[in-house]
Image: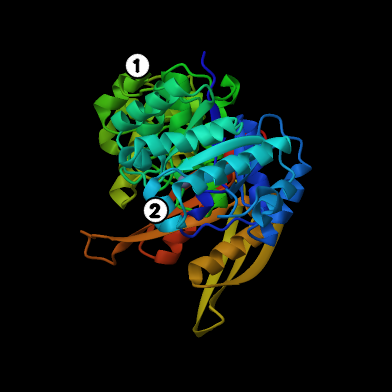
């Protein structure tokens, strides 16, 4: 199997994305996850750029990493200068890493018009910088910025920049599609020229402006590239970077390349989720391989087929990438849909068992009341547990009160009081919040935390309200969907009532109970 060095730039190029700002602690945690996954290189930023980065490099140097090598990233020496006395290069060395990535220009017009120097001086800047870093014992990656656009404009000069780097001792030459507009066949053809001409290892760095970063990266590998740069979830500026969460399984599970230790592949979904959480981004449910809906099935016939033979509508077994099959629940989906959820809880129940009928009846009744479980499979799992008697309440609600005070003071306009019972212990707490639902959420967590400390890990990530058409001429009903997440998972729960607070309460309780059930099953 051909080995591919996976090179993650989530913390460097990924940090250029809009709205991303990692603390030092966040970065250390991400490094830990990437290392556990088996990533070969982690490009972690430019140590010269700010004190936060310096602190990070000091802390990361003390970590004992199993698989990954940390890379400090910076540019070639300044025009007309000297590498040994260049302040940026000095701070790169002070980062204390064993490997450094140096980016340099390979498009002639960028040299003359943006850098405003001669084509020869640019070659010297590349060569001097790399030779000096090699003398200091560094592993050096040369990032040829705008390589593909440069090659299209002036192939001779683009290749000369690579030759300057290779002759100076670069360990790899990374070809960058910096503007992200190339097509797979161009990437293949140009990479093939490079791999045919140089003995040095070749890397690929693609951006996603034409939505082809993954396809382009695979094309480069087929043309002989052995290092692939990208980011977790494809995060990066503009339309993002090449998405490693798609590239890794495509290369390893489909094309037979060796990217990460096979036993680590099942960590992929949780690493993707972890980075989404830390980056405080909304999860992309439709993401290939790792998205919540990547293996979600709806519609009776599909589900029937998937239950018989998963390959009928699945390109890969979800468990191989640490994801799972979900069945979008609806009355019309039929018995086999239900059976999949029922069997996940109790494998002994058969298709025509009375329990299956009971679940079916309960689903019909709830859908009639305005519940819709297609996007709230976590609430549906709790419904099935209740019908099957596989449910132990974690707490009893005695009562709650919510008071709204307007005008608000510092964003707080509501308070909630709640009385619950856990076993023989009764707990009364009160909390404030921004709006009645937030106050209620705060109060119920505060009340339950002493019994179930894991509740602290739950984050409420989305809250949606829909007013349902009422055909009963009474008050309109509302449906509340709450999305929650912790470091393992994200889940959606539902509540329906004529009263928005009550509907929210039902969804909140499900969100908490679902977390506790899952933790119990995981044994954590
Ligand atoms: Zn980039």
* Mark 2, other Cα within 10 Å: few <14 / some 14–19 / many ≥20: some
SS at mark 2 in the image? loop
Residue pictured at 34% horizontal, 16% vertical: 308
* Mark 1, other Cα within 10 Å: few <14 / some 14–19 / many ≥20: few
Which of the marked residues, 2 or 1, is nearer the chain's N terminus? 2
- 350 vs 442, left or right, is left
- 434 vs 90, left or right, is left
SS at mark 1 in the image? helix
- 373 vs 332, left or right, is right
The residue singled out by tag 1 in the image is 308
Residue pictured at 46% horizontal, 16% vertical: 256
> In this view of the protein, can residue 450 be seen by the observer?
no
Q: Are marks 2 and 1 in contact (CB under 8 Å)?
A: no
Q: Residue 66's spot in the image, x, y percent?
A: 71, 30
Q: Is mark 1 within 8 Å of ligand 1?
A: no
Q: Is mark 2 within 8 Å of ligand 1?
A: no
Identify which residue, 183 or 34, lies in the foreground: 183
Quadrant in the picture for the C terminus: top right
Q: Quadrant of residue 86?
A: bottom right
> Height in image: 290 above or below 439?
above
Q: Residue 338's spot in the image, x, y percent?
A: 37, 30
Q: Residue 499's spot in the image, x, y percent?
A: 39, 65
The residue singled out by tag 2 in the image is 238
Q: CA distance from mark 2 to mark 1?
A: 42 Å
Q: Residue 301's spot in the image, x, y percent?
A: 25, 25
Q: Quadrant of residue 515?
A: top right
Identify which residue, 170 or 23, lies in the foreground: 170
> In this view of the protein, can residue 383 be seen by the observer?
yes
């Amino acid at each position: 199997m051909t080995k591919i060095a996976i090179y993650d730039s989530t913390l460097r190029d990924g940090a250029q994305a809009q709205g991303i700002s990692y603390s030092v602690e966040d970065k250390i945690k991400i490094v830990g996850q990437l290392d556990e996954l088996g990533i070969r290189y982690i490009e972690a930023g430019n140590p010269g750029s700010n004190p936060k980065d310096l602190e990070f490099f000091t802390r990361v140097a003390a970590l004992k990493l199993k698989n990954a090598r940390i890379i400090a990233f910076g540019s070639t020496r300044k025009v007309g200068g000297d590498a040994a006395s260049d302040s940026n290069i000095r701070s790169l060395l002070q980062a204390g890493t064993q490997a450094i990535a140096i980016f340099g220009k390979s498009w002639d017009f960028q040299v003359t018009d943006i850098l405003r120097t001669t084509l020869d001086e640019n070659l010297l800047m590349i060569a001097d910088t790399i030779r000096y870093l090699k003398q200091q014992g560094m592993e050096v990656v040369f990032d040829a910025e705008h390589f593909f656009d440069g090659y299209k404009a002036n192939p001779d000069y683009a290749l000369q920049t690579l030759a300057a780097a290779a002759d100076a001792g670069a360990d790899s030459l990374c070809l960058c599609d910096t503007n992200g507009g190339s097509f797979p066949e161009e990437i293949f053809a140009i990479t093939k020229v490079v791999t045919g001409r140089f003995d040095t290892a070749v890397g690929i760095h693609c951006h996603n402006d034409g939505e082809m970063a993954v396809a382009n990266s695979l094309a480069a590998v087929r043309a002989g590239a052995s290092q692939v740069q990208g980011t977790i979830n494809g995060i990066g500026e503009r339309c993002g970077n090449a998405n490693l969460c798609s590239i890794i399984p495509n290369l390893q599970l489909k094309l037979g390349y060796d990217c990460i230790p096979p036993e680590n592949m099942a960590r992929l979904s949780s690493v993707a989720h972890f980075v989404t959480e830390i980056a405080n981004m909304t999860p992309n449910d439709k993401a290939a391989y790792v998205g919540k809906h990547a293996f979600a099935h709806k519609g009776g016939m599909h589900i029937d087929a998937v239950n018989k033979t998963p390959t009928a509508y699945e390109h890969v077994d979800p468990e191989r990438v640490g994801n799972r099959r979900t069945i979008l629940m609806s009355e019309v989906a039929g018995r086999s849909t239900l059976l999949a959820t029922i069997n996940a809880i109790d494998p002994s129940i058969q298709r025509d068992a009375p329990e299956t009928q009971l679940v079916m009846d309960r689903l019909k009744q709830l859908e009639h009341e305005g519940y819709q479980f297609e996007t709230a499979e976590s609430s549906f799992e709790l419904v099935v547990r209740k019908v099957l008697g596989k449910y132990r309440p974690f707490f009893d609600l005695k009562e709650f009160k919510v008071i709204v005070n307007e005008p608000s003071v510092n964003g707080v306009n509501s308070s909630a009081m709640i009385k619950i019972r856990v076993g023989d212990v009764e707990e009364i707490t009160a909390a404030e919040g921004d709006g009645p639902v937030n106050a209620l959420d705060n109060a119920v967590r505060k009340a339950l935390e002493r019994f179930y400390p894991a509740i602290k890990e739950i984050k409420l990530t989305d809250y949606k309200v829909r007013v349902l058409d009422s055909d009963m001429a009474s008050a309109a009903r509302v449906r509340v969907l709450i999305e929650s997440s912790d470091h393992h998972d994200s889940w959606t729960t539902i509540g329906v009532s004529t009263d928005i607070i009550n509907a929210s309460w039902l969804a909140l309780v499900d969100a908490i109970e679902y977390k506790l059930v899952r933790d119990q099953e995981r044994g954590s």
